[in-house]
Image (cartoon, rainbow, N blue to C red):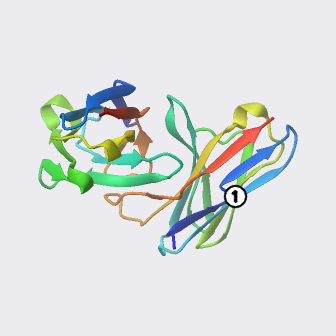
């Protein structure tokens, strides 16, 4: 079974600073990986996905993530944080041919002015 | 209009009451899911359905039941609500391709007193 670990339940950054959210997965076979964002009182919105094409994946709102098989990681970054990036972020993994999406516990991002 | 619509958005009820949460989608997807979200636990799968006649238990199905009334409609019921079912509930849909993401509704916030 797939599992996901997000390191850090809360991250606080200054506006304009780098945002780095860490995600590690457990799988012997490279899976499909997703990052979702949840704004207050809203559902989960897809930021980006990795499906075995390019290892550096660009998403919406200036976010990107790099798949590193050797480290079983899929960390999410944004070079310059904006106040509107304050939200909760979830990493999720799905095995190839699988239906089940396994979520990490989430990381809440706050942005300081 | 939203692709995945959940009703109601908020509900407060008492222990022992029967509650139904509804989900409808316009994405044309065959697969539908119900999750609950609790702080620090991410999203956990309650039930999923691959089509109208194919319904399966997820990892935390005890105390819940579902009905797939049509391809576009998937409802979740709590037969006799208890306080530890207080949570945020999400409906999601996906195509049959495992490399595609799931699409989420805006959630139902359920409080059981």
Seen from the viewer's position, the closer of residues A112 and B68 is A112
Q: Kindly tell me whether residue A51 is visible in this rendering.
A: no
Seen from the viewer's position, the closer of residues A83 and A41 is A83
- The picture quadrant where one finds residue B15 is top right
Quadrant where the image shows the C terminus of chain A: top left
- Tell whether A4 sits left or right of A69: right
Q: Residue at x 31, y 52 (%)?
A: A47
Seen from the viewer's position, the closer of residues A5 and A31 is A5
Quadrant where the image shows the N terminus of chain A: top left
* Residue wearing tag 1: B8
- Tell whether A43 sits left or right of A35: right
Q: Position of residue B19 (x, y in %)?
A: 79, 51
Q: Residue at x 59, y 73 (%)?
A: B71
Q: Residue at x 18, y 41 (%)?
A: A80
| Circle 1 Cα neighbour tier, 10 Å, few/some/many (<14 / 14–19 / ≥20) | some
Q: Position of residue A111 (x, y in %)?
A: 32, 34
SS at mark 1 in the image: loop
Residue sticking out furthest to the right:
B16
- Tell whether A45 sits left or right of B24: left
Q: Position of residue B29 (x, y in %)?
A: 48, 70
Q: Is residue B29 above or below residue A58?
A: below
Q: Residue at x 25, y 56 (%)?
A: A60
Q: Kindly tell me whether residue A14 is visible in this rendering.
A: yes
């Amino acid at each position: 079974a797939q599992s996901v670990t997000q390191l850090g339940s809360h991250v606080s950054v200054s506006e304009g600073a780098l945002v780095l959210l860490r995600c590690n997965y457990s799988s012997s076979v490279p899976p499909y990986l997703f990052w979702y964002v949840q704004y207050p009182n809203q559902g989960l919105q897809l930021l980006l996905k990795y499906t075995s094409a390019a290892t550096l994946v660009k998403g919406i709102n200036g976010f990107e993530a790099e798949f590193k098989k050797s480290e079983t990681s899929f960390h999410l970054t944004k070079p310059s944080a904006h106040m509107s990036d304050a939200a909760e972020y979830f990493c999720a993994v799905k095995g190839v041919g699988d239906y089940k999406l396994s979520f990490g516990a989430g990381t809440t991002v706050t942005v300081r002015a | 209009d939203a692709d995945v619509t959940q009703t109601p958005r908020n509900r407060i009820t008492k222990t022992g009451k029967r509650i139904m949460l509804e989900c409808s989608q316009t994405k044309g997807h065959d697969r539908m899911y119900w999750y609950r979200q609790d702080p620090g636990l991410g999203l956990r799968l309650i039930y999923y359905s691959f089509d109208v006649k194919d319904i399966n238990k997820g990892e935390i199905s005890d105390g819940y039941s579902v009905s797939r009334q049509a391809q576009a409609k998937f409802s979740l019921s709590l037969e006799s609500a208890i306080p530890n079912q207080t949570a945020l509930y999400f409906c999601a849909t996906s195509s049959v391709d495992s490399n595609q993401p799931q699409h989420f509704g805006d959630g139902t916030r359920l409080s059981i007193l």
